[in-house]
Amino acid sequence: MPSHINVKICGVTRPVDVAAVADAGARYMGLVFFPKSPRFVTLEKAAELSAVAPVGLCKVALVVNPTDAELDAITESVPLDMLQLHGSETPERVSEIKVRYGLPVMKAIGVGSADDLAALDIYGQVADQLLVDTKPPKDAVLPGGNGLAFDWSLVAGRRWPVPWMLAGGLNADTVREAIRVTGATQVDLSSAVESSPGVKDAGLIHAFCKAALAD
Ligand SMILES: O=C(O)c1ccccc1NCC(=O)[C@H](O)[C@H](O)COP(=O)(O)O
C-alpha cells in the first residue's frame, strides 16, 4: 500500500541522484539555483537532470529572491513542475511569480521561535505550498540546507490552508518522531543524505525514504 507521506530530496546534482531519489520512492526532487550552495546547478545541468526524471517525480526549482530575468532563464531552459522561493520574497512577489510563470509556488518560511509562525499564516494565503524549515543562523551562508533542526513542538498541531512540508536537519533516525510530533505528511531534506556537502548518497537516500515511508 502506498505511504501517505511524501518525501522531497533537495539538491540533486547528478543523474544517479535522480535515479536514487525516484527508486527510493520520493515524490519531489529539488534543483538548487543558489550560486553559493554546494548543490548549485547550472541551467544546462538542471536541464539534463530534469530530462532524466521519471514521470511522477515532481521537479522543483529552488531560488532565492529571484529576478524575473533569472526565472525567465530557468523556466525557459528547464522543464519544471514547481518553484520553491527560499528568500525574503514578499506575499505580493509570491503572487506575481505564480501568475507570471503559471507554476505552483512553494514558499519556505524559517522557524526559530513562536514569533516566526505568523508568517506561515500570511504566506498560506498566497502560496500553493509551504516549506516549514529551520531559520538559518544569522551568519549562515545558505538560507537553507544547513542540516539544523528546529523545535518541532512549535508547529505541533498547526495547520494551514495549503499542503506543507517539514524540513530542517531531518535524517533517517529522526524523521518518524518529527512526523509524529508535527503531523507532517510531507518531509524535505538535503544534508543528511549526503556523503559530503553537495554529494548525494544513494544508500542514505534509500535509508531515509524507507524510514519516512514506513507506516
Ligand atoms: O540546500 C541548499 O543548498 C539551499 C541553498 C539555498 C537555499 C535553500 C537551500 N535548501 C533548501 C531546502 O529545501 C533544504 O532541503 C532544506 O532547507 C532542508 O535542508 P537540510 O536541513 O540540510 O536537510
Image (cartoon, rainbow, N blue to C red):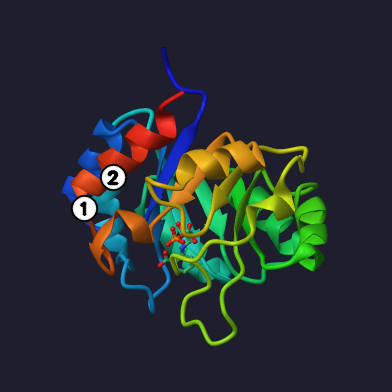
Does residue 90 sit above or below 201 in this rendering? below
Name the amino acid, label 1: Asp
Most extreme residue toward the left is 16
Residue at figure coordinates x 30%, y 46% from the top left: 50
Q: Are marks 2 and 1 in contact (CB under 8 Å)?
A: yes
Where, quadrant-wise, is the N terminus in this rendering? top left
- At x 59%, y 37%, the residue is 180
Q: Nearer the viewer, residue 134 or 87?
A: 134
Examine the rendering and report whether any part of residue 121 can be seen. yes
Quadrant position of residue 200: bottom left
When asked about the image quadrant of residue 8, the answer is top left
Return the residue nearer the eye: 40 or 150: 150
For badge 2, the amino acid type reads: Ile
In the displayed image of the protein, which residue is found farthest to the bottom? 139
Marks 2/1: CA–CA distance: 6 Å
Instruction: Name the residue nearer the viewer: 36 or 48.
Output: 36
**Which residue is the site of mark 1?**
201
Q: Is residue 8 above or below residue 5?
A: below
x and y percent of residue 157 in the render?
75, 40
Q: Disc 1, ligand 1: is the CB inside 8 Å?
A: no
Return the mark for residue 205: 2
Q: Is residue 53 visible in the rendered structure shown here?
A: no
Image location of residue 199, percent across then percent down: 23, 62
